Amino acid sequence: MSEPSDRPSRPASKPSERPSWLEIAADDPFGVHNLPYGAFDPGDGSRRLGARIGDRVLDLAALERAGLVEARGTLQAATLNPYMALGRPYWKAVRDRLTELLTDQIFRYRVERLLVPLADVTPGLPFEVGDYVDFYSSQEHATNLGRLFRPGSPPLLPNWKHLPIGYHGRAGTVVVSGTDIVRPNGQRKPPDAPAPTFGPSQRLDIEAEVGFVVGAPSSLGTPLTTKDFYEYEFGVVLHNDRSARELQAWEYQPLGPFLGKSFATSVSAWVVPLDALAQARVPAPEQSPPVLPYLADERTGYDIRIEVVWNGTVVSRPPFSGLYWTPAQQLAHLTANGASVRPGDLYASGTVSGAKRAEVGSFIELTWGGAEPVTLADGRTRTFLEDGDTVTLTATAPGLDGTVVGFGEVVGRIQPPRR
């Protein structure tokens, strides 16, 4: 395989025209139209990079060693960061090559032996998180929380429609799906209490979000524009930004979230390439008042449909397509002051909520601050997460020719506090 160039390449055939030689259902969300990247342990304690195809994982390290794909040795790494740093020409060339290897019968004998059953591997965090930023981009979510946290005041703060609000999180607390979540401790003070107390959070919540993984680095002091999004953004993960609501309520003024957010944020094990979501692009909601020129963009969102399952019961289906601030605007804003980005930087959408109660992305909205408990399928009621509870997020998006793009899942079980 030759090195990639910036010259135009022949358009790839449609998945329906080039089905995989692998026995895989046409409606499998992890077909050749997707090919998300991840890191995995095949059972021997090592850590390798792979691409998911159906219910198997293609060993990319072995593929590169066999001379079947060329990525300057970066597929031998334990995380995606070195590969992502190569930039978009390589991302496209490698993706096109993987599609060719998995659809052309001539490669079947050499490639099939490098496929590992998904059931036999342990997924790991696919990339080393550099910086982590979480936004607040759903108008419905921001309005709901404004009414809950600031009753009697306008639900949206004056700056909300002028810039994407966000906070800087702790990269070291981002964990891969399947990791248990220990209930956090912290300070909390109810409005009628004379003083704060310290202890385990009793209002532990989820936030159903979509995360964007930066691939290409930028230069310190040089802002990116909304038009740079496609060149710098590598892929997308499903994201759960867990929140301890009473800790958050006590600490967030005047500097914003801190310990109520920084104990554990989960992401899916598979990074869906941005190119796999080309058919999921949809018009984003109109913005009023007009934004400043550096935030002007094509108003393009993504039709990503999330499902929230609480102890086996579907409780919500948040629609990502309705977010007020687009991923391109978020990238432009987080670099507007000259801040640079690096391979592996992660920024998330903020809680995805729709206009209906069955479309909200957090339990504080679903139960309206705990005042309206939810009854699960087994008859038990919940307001916030209890020890032993499991929440699973899944998501899909439209693909080419009626296919579906899958994101995998984000799942975590709540464990009691350790101290």
Image (cartoon, helix red, strand yellow):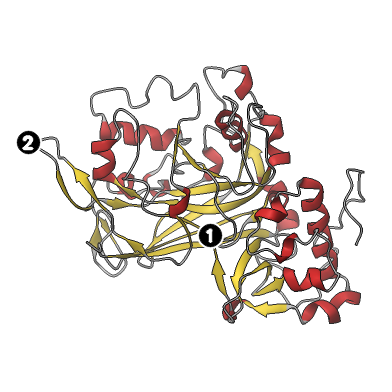
Of badges 1 and 2, nearer the viewer stands 2
Q: Secondary structure at mark 1?
A: loop
Pinpoint residue 285: horizontal percent, then vertical percent: 56, 31
Q: Amino acid at mark 1?
A: Ser
The dot on residue 194 is 2
Residue 180, image x and y in percent? 38, 66
**Type of amino acid under label 2:** Pro
Are dots 1 and 2 in contact, CB under 8 Å?
no
Location of residue 299 by image quarter:
top right
Question: Would residue 52 appear left or right of 135 to someone viewing this image?
Answer: right
Element class at badge 2: loop
Residue 398 shows in the view = no
Numbered tag placed on residue 169 in the rendering: none
Mark 1–mark 2 distance (CA, rounded to whole Å): 42 Å
The correct choice, above or below, for 305 with respect to 392 in the image is above
User: Which residue occupies 57% across, 78% down?
Assistant: 45
Q: Residue at x 68, y 41 (%)?
A: 217
Against 361, is 177 above or below? below
The residue pinned by badge 1 equals 268
In percent of width and height, residue 363 lies at 33, 50
Residue 105: name its quadrant: bottom right
